[in-house]
Image (spheres, rainbow, N blue to C red):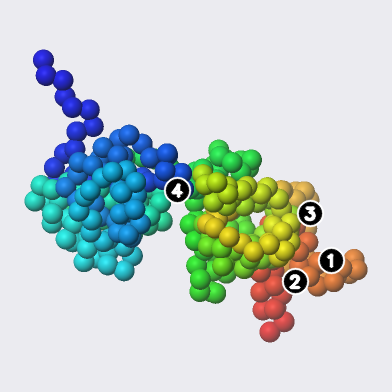
Amino acid sequence: MIEREKNKIVGGMLYLVATPIGNLSDISERAVKTLSEVDFIAAEDTRNTAKLLMNLGISKTLISYHDHNRREAGERIAERLASGESCALVTDAGVPAISDPGEDLVALCAERGIPVTSVPGACAFITALTLSALPTRRFVFEGFLPVKSKERRERLDALSREERTFVLHEAPHKLRTTLADLADTLGGDRRISVCRELTKLNEEVIRVTLAEAVEYYAEREPRGEYVLVVEGRVNTQTPSDAPVMSPEEAVAYYEKQGMNKNQAVKEAAKLLGISRNEVYRATIDDKN
């Protein structure tokens, strides 16, 4: 009886190969075998992947597949796969097709009946979750927040009502703005784990409140890549006999207790279980 080769590379197959997010030793034996034996590799940045392959002692044809050429390059890759070639898809770090244009290529292959398999490995947001010390039984991965103000505000408002732990990616030059936006929308007392340079020599995990995170980075220059793990909203129920208030009524009530407008809005948001931005908008609309 002839033993079948373990992890044999099959022609006409797309392989989604996870690559290290910082520590080269995290690459798997199966990933190295796959990268060595496929007919070609599609990479987000061929320069970065070339360095990885050089460290692994692999020489392989590389083609570019990224956000700006996904449609044209995806068609070319699909045609080569349909002709019987095998391809490994990699991103710069972590798992391809997660918050990545690879999702379009997988969808195209599914549409064309081209088989796809995954070679799992390091994943930044999963690594951050395990280190966060926040609830991980139920969570949401949000990737990067939108840049445009309207879309960003809508997403933040939705997250203010999210009861599950949620995870964000952020670049160093945008970290302070994102932390400030989160604190303003969710409240400064919400817990967050700020994870930096995961699996690298300078790995750092800071478990604080949003207000403390804003203060921490006001005094320090953000460096490296960040994953933010944020506590979900605690679902506090008001007593069944409590009167139902509008945002305007709740703000007015707290102002009568001697609070200024900002404090009143914060407390009204907590009482009503909505974001501060929603309370602000409701009170402004009521006056117009």
Instruction: Mark 1 or mark 3: name the one nearer the start of the chain.
Output: 3
**Which residue shows up at 22% across the image and 28% down it?**
6
Amino acid, disc 2:
Glu
**Side of 88 relative to 188 (left or right):** left
Q: Which residue is mark 2?
A: 248
Of the residues tagged 2 and 1, which is closer to the observer? 1
Q: Which residue is mark 4?
A: 21
Q: CA distance from mark 2 to mark 1?
A: 10 Å
**Which residue shows up at 32% across the image and 34% down it?**
29
Quadrant of the image containing the C terminus: bottom right
Q: Which residue is mark 3?
A: 242
- The label shown at residue 254 is 1
Instruction: Mark 2 or mark 3: name the one nearer the start of the chain.
Output: 3
**Side of 274 relative to 65 (left or right):** right
Of the residues tagged 2 and 3, which is closer to the observer? 2
Residue 213 x/y as whole percent: 69, 57
Q: Nearer the viewer, residue 120 or 151?
A: 120
Amino acid, disc 1:
Tyr
Of the residues tagged 4 and 1, which is closer to the observer? 4
**Side of 30 relative to 167 (left or right):** left
Q: Secondary structure at mark 3?
A: loop
Instruction: Mark 3 or mark 4: name the one nearer the start of the chain.
Output: 4
**Which residue shows up at 49% across the image and 61% down it?**
144
Residue 140 x/y as whole percent: 51, 49
Of the residues tagged 2 and 4, which is closer to the observer? 4
**Does residue 147 sit above or below 108 in this rendering?**
below
Of the residues tagged 3 and 4, which is closer to the observer? 4
Residue 50 x/y as whole percent: 30, 54
